[in-house]
Amino acid sequence: MKILIVDDSRLARKELIGLLQHHPECEIVAEAGDVQSAVSAINQLHPDLVLLDINLPDGNGFDVLEQSDYTPGVIFTTAYEEHAVQAFEYNALDYLLKPITQDRLDTAMHKMAARAQHVPFNQPEKSLDAHIFIREGERCHFIKFREISRIAVEGNYVRVHFGIMSAPVLRSLNYVEARLDPQAFFRANRQEIINLNFIDRIEPWIGDGLMIVMQDCTEVIASRRQARELKQRLEF
């Protein structure tokens, strides 16, 4: 099990390393003391688990998860109780309050081991019957993947379109794409992913590209390279 430790305190990182010595199955692949170095380590090393502090010099632990293109298992390690509810909205395995004891860490690691036996974190659920939970202000959307027609970059986040509605998700397009069923969803260009089941028609476009017209009349342009891949996918 590859582990990344993220904490701005070198002493706290050292203490966690000491506690993890009781888990020979674990390999500490890196340490990070701020958001940017943590994001870089996650994207490059793809750890199975991150022991993640919340308060960091250039942001917080939630920023790390929002900005990462890869999703590891997460155990929050913090001195503050008030972030627990938000932590579990990010599917945290556990929320450990400092000072962290050996017993509490062992319990959290057992949760990780049990979950990994059933749903490995590097193999996220891609079934069209699976759901995505999106919080938008005071509103909450619980959406089946099969209901999503299009996902598009919008500034620093993506917007998920479903039915006649849409909602923002504070994730990168690469992060979202990794969780979608590749049999149903297609990356049309750098900014958009479409659900092939919601295509109305496809028309030729400039430079051997394609214009994909969705059922809601949205026009999505596929470049020549993506057009070639789409033709292979749809066998036309």
Image: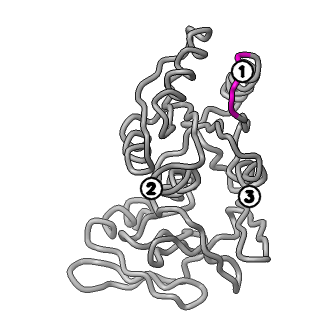
* Point 33% across, 66% down: residue: 226
Badge 2 marks a residue whose secondary structure is: loop
- Mark 2 lies on residue: 58
The kind of residue tagged 1 is Thr
Residue that badge 3 annotates: 131
Mark 1 lies on residue: 101
Q: From what the image shows, is residue 99 above or below residue 154?
A: above
The crowd level at tag 2 (other Cα within 10 Å; few <14, some 14-19, many 20+) is few
Q: Amino acid at mark 2?
A: Asp
Amino acid, disc 3: His
Q: Is residue 87 left or right of residue 13?
A: right
Query: Which of the two discs, 3 and 1, sits closer to the camera?
Result: 1
Question: In the rendered image, which quarter is residue 20 located in?
Answer: top right
In the image, residue 3 sits, relative to residue 178, either above or below, namely above
The picture places residue 2, in percent across and down from the top left corner, at 49, 24
Return the disc, 3 or 1, that comes first in the chain's sequence.
1
Please tell me how crowded label 3 is: few (under 14), some (14-19), or many (20+) other residues with Cα within 10 Å.
some
Which residue does the image show at 57% across and 39% down from the upper left? 52
**What percent of the width, then of the height, locates residue 199?**
54, 78
